[in-house]
Image (cartoon, rainbow, N blue to C red):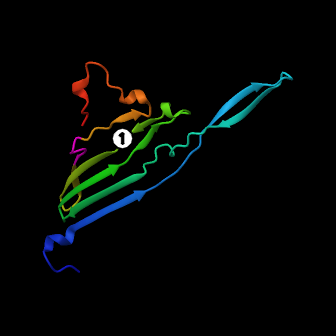
Amino acid sequence: MYDGLPFLQDVYVSGNLTLQKSEVTAREVQYETTSASTDTMYYKYLKYPRALYGQVPLLYNAGIQYAGKKLGLNLTYNHAGYKTFITGVEPAYVEYERPHSQMDAQISYKFLKGKIETNLNVSNLLDATFRYFINDPTTYELKSGNEDKLNLE
């Protein structure tokens, strides 16, 4: 039992870290007519392995919460690494979501001896943008007249 500052008895800290790795080898259906005029179907395995769809190799979050008898406060920070957003059979067709971080907050208050509770949630306090890119050389090509728009942060 904590005997220090009384309000710290209602403060909680949380967090986690997830590291994961996977590899998927895609396959493509091939159709062929043999010399005997027989139609055949087979799979051709592609040589471009990629991460599992939607998997984030690095994910972490941290939070702090105050849970008083009437007032509740919660602040969380989340970070997600690169993620496959759209898959394709060729690397040039795969679309990725860039890493992003987000901070969210919640304030709650209980009325009438806890019979009614109201919440105010605020998401994306850091105004983080979700950015996507295609793994293709043209993604990085600077178009004439856009030199001043190079910094996308």
Q: In the image, residue 64 lies at what x, y percent?
A: 23, 61
Residue 124 lies in quadrant: top left
Which quadrant is the C terminus positioned in? top left
Q: In the image, residue 17 lies at what x, y percent?
A: 37, 59
In this figure, which residue is indicated by the disc labeled 1?
98
Residue at horizontal 22%, vertical 61%?
114
Decide whether residue 100 is among the magenta residues. Answer: no
Residue at horizontal 46%, vertical 55%?
20
Q: Nearer the viewer, residue 124 or 115?
A: 124
Q: In the image, residue 130 lies at what x, y percent?
A: 32, 38
Residue at horizontal 23%, vertical 61%?
65
Is the stretch drawn in magenta largely helix, strand or loop?
Answer: loop
Tag 1: residue type?
Arg
Which quadrant is the N terminus positioned in? bottom left
**Direction from residue 47 to residue 93 in the image, left or right:** left
Residue at horizontal 21%, vertical 68%?
10
The residue stretch that appears in magenta: 121-127
Residue 152 lies in quadrant: top left
Q: In the image, residue 57 lies at what x, y percent?
A: 43, 51
